[in-house]
Every structure is written in structure tokens, then in C-alpha cells.
Image (spheres, rainbow, N blue to C red):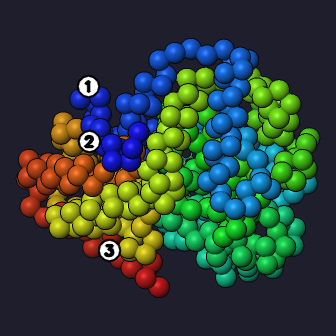
Amino acid sequence: MPVSDLRIAPPHLGEPYLLTPGPLTTSYAVKEAMLRDWGSWDGDFRAMTAELRTRLLALLGPGSDAFDCVPMQGSGTFAVEAMLASFIPRDGKALVLANGAYGMRSVQTLEYLGRDHVVLNKGDYLPPRGDEVAKFLAEDPAITHVVAIHCETSSGILNPVEEISEVVYGAGRKLLIDSMSAFGAIPLEVEQVRYEAMVSSANKCIEGVPGFGFIIARKDELEAAKGNSHSLSLDVHAQWAHMNKTGQWRFTPPTHVVAAFLEALRAHELEGGVAGRGGRYSRNRDVMVAGMRELGFETLLDNRWLSPIIVTFFCPADETFVFDRFYELMKDKGFIIYPGKLTVVDSFRVGCIGQMDEHVMRQVVSAAKDSLAEMGVANAAPPTPALKERAKLAV
Ligand SMILES: *Cc1c(COP(=O)(O)O)cnc(C)c1O
């Protein structure tokens, strides 16, 4: 398919657009790829698994031959748990850099796993900075691994992983990255950012359907991971060794999801890979944020920290604004938005990822404008406490 034919198709059969960070709106071709059955042990499917692994590794850029890719059944959280359990030895200690729900989920996972850990908790959205991490590491020599969230999807902040990586390796420790909602749209090339392992999943920026995640790790870390995991099904070393030996997944793979994912990977390449995908998402964000600001909405984050993945807006101070009603009005117009996750002030989120382009984003803005008018909201400006909250970022 020539690139000029790459149109953003409206969702099939009048489904709403999912302005949510996965599951997201997929192309018709991705859905269509699921219309047949595969035997999991058959050569055709083994070739599909091999292609998937090779294509994902290629996204790391030069130097990717030191890494390998291990797909893992389940949602993204399963892959995060598999990574943490497999690469942090039982006598290791992790420092988790948390600034939202996904960082806290890694903390909770380590609690379940019984792995020693400490948390640098920045609250709802403030970014963990290099100097703070350096201080933590200097004060606690027992820390072996640092866990960072690339894009913290709960606020939409793009955390400074390059800065964090430099500090971690400067202190002789190892970095594990949850790049779930960023990988495929934001570069994570191994020559630019040093890390031991990262995870992402099928239903985020590659634009597949949900059903598996994948761990990309240095081969020597994969070797060394033998015996670390507490779990049979989530053991990354075992899955890797078995896949390399037999070409198969250890347990029933999500065959249709893999077929859809390959189609999504081909579209990703045609769009220009990580740069092309990230470029479209950035335009989505820019058009949507500019339009929403014109309506009086304000973003939680300054432009500097806004990811092209998902954007948090404050709910308007106007008392006629009720989020549940706004949600239903937006849904009636064909757009599913997302409630916010801030603990201090009311907010909502709008995703920029999936099969959507800037034209769709303009429709999102006009749907928001009409929804406000229907609710009788004259002014979308946020309440003063929200702005005070945001001022914390400026310091
Ligand atoms: C989506 C996501 C996950 C995984 O969530 P699941 O619901 O298990 O797929 C983990 N971390 C981040 C940063 C995410 O955006």
C-alpha cells in the first residue's frame, strides 16, 4: 500500500472513537486480520511470532542486536509484573519513581512479589528529576534497580527518562522502564537511552488489539534472569528460552491478537515508524490542545511536559459543568473520553493515540464546544485551586 493511501478511516459501523490510551481505535485492516484461525504450533504461526519479535527489536535502532524481545500473554500489567519479577533478583532492591497510578502499580506489584523496594513519590504528576534520583541512590547503596515510567498515562506527563538513565548508570545501578503507553511513538533507542529492559503492549502506540504485552531486554539480563521469577506463567526467562528453542509460546498464545498486531506493525512502518507515528500523535495533541484552550479549558501540564499520548484538562469551575453529563454528550457525538485520575482537583483526559488524525481532533473540539453549550456552561475556565496546583510545576 503506497503511503498516500494511508487514510485514517472512521471507525467501522459508526462506533465511537476511543480517545483513551488503549484499548484504542484500530484500523479496519487490523480488525480484518483476525478473521481466521491459526494453530499455535503450526509453522505459519511460528513465523508470525518470529516476525513480530524482529519487527519490535528493529524499533530500538542500532545496537538492538544486544537485545531480545519476549512477548507475554495478558494485559500490559502482566508484562510489567513479569519484568519486575524476572530482572530484580530476590535479594535485590528497587527504587520506584512514581508520579501517578502506573508508578504506584509497580510499587504494589513489588509488594505482592515480596521484593524489597523504596519509592520516590512525586504525587499526582510532578516529574522525578535526575538530581533527586541521584540523592536517593547515594543514600541507599542497597538499591540495585530503578523502575521508571516513560509516559505516566494517568496524567499524561512524559517523564525525563534520558536524564534518569544517566544518573542511574552513573551510580552503577540498572534501569527498568515501563514504556507501555510511549513505545512506538516516542523514541527509546538503545544508543540514546541506556536500560536493561522495557515493556509495552499490543494495544497502545502500535495500535493493535489487547491480548499480550512484550518485554524487550538485554540478552545478558535475560540469561541472568533464570530462576528469579516467583511465577511459572510470568517467567520471562522461561518464555524466552522456550521461544528461542521451539519458536512457540509456552502456553496458548492469543493467535488472533498476534495476527492483528502484525498488520498494525506493517502500518506503523508504512507511516514512517516511530518518527511518523509520533509526528501524527503530536499534531493530534497540538490541534486538540489549541482548540480546547480556545474554549477556555486549561491543561494540567505546561507544554514542556505534555506528552503526545494523552492530555489532562481541568474540569471547568462553572457549576453547570458535570463530568458524567459531558461524557455522555461527547459519546453521543461519537467520542469516548476518559475520567481524570488527579486526587486534588477534578479533571478529565483526552487521548491522542489510535487511528485518528488532526481532522478528527478538530471534530473532538467542536463536539466539546457543542457539549458545553448544551450543558449551559458559559466559561470552561478551571477553579482557582486547580491553577494553584499547576503553579507547583513552574518551580
Ligand atoms: C496501559 C498501561 C499499563 C498497563 O495497563 P493494562 O491495563 O494492564 O494494559 C501499564 N503502564 C502504563 C504506563 C500504561 O499506560
Q: Secondary structure at mark 2?
A: strand
Foreground residue among 154 and 185? 185
Give coordinates of residue 326: x percent, y percent.
21, 46
Q: Residues within 10 Å of mark 3 (few under 14, many from 20)?
A: some
| 3D distance between C-alphas at marks 2 and 1 | 14 Å
Give coordinates of residue 389: x percent, y percent.
39, 73
State left or right for residue 183 relative to residue 369.
right
Q: Amino acid at mark 3?
A: Leu
Q: Amino acid at mark 1?
A: Leu
Mark in the foreground, 1 or 3: 1
Image quarter in which the N terminus is found? top left
Mark in the foreground, 2 or 1: 1
Q: Which mark is residue 13?
A: 1
Q: Name which residue lies at 71% across and 26% down.
A: 46
Query: Splitting the image into 4 quarters, where does residue 76 fall?
Result: top right
Q: Amino acid at mark 2?
A: Phe
Give coordinates of residue 333: x percent, y percent.
18, 39
State left or right for residue 222 relative to residue 37.
right
Foreground residue among 253 and 76? 253
| 3D distance between C-alphas at marks 1 and 3 | 41 Å
**Residue corresponding to mark 2:** 335
Q: How many labels, in total?
A: 3
**Residue corresponding to mark 3:** 387
Q: Secondary structure at mark 1?
A: helix
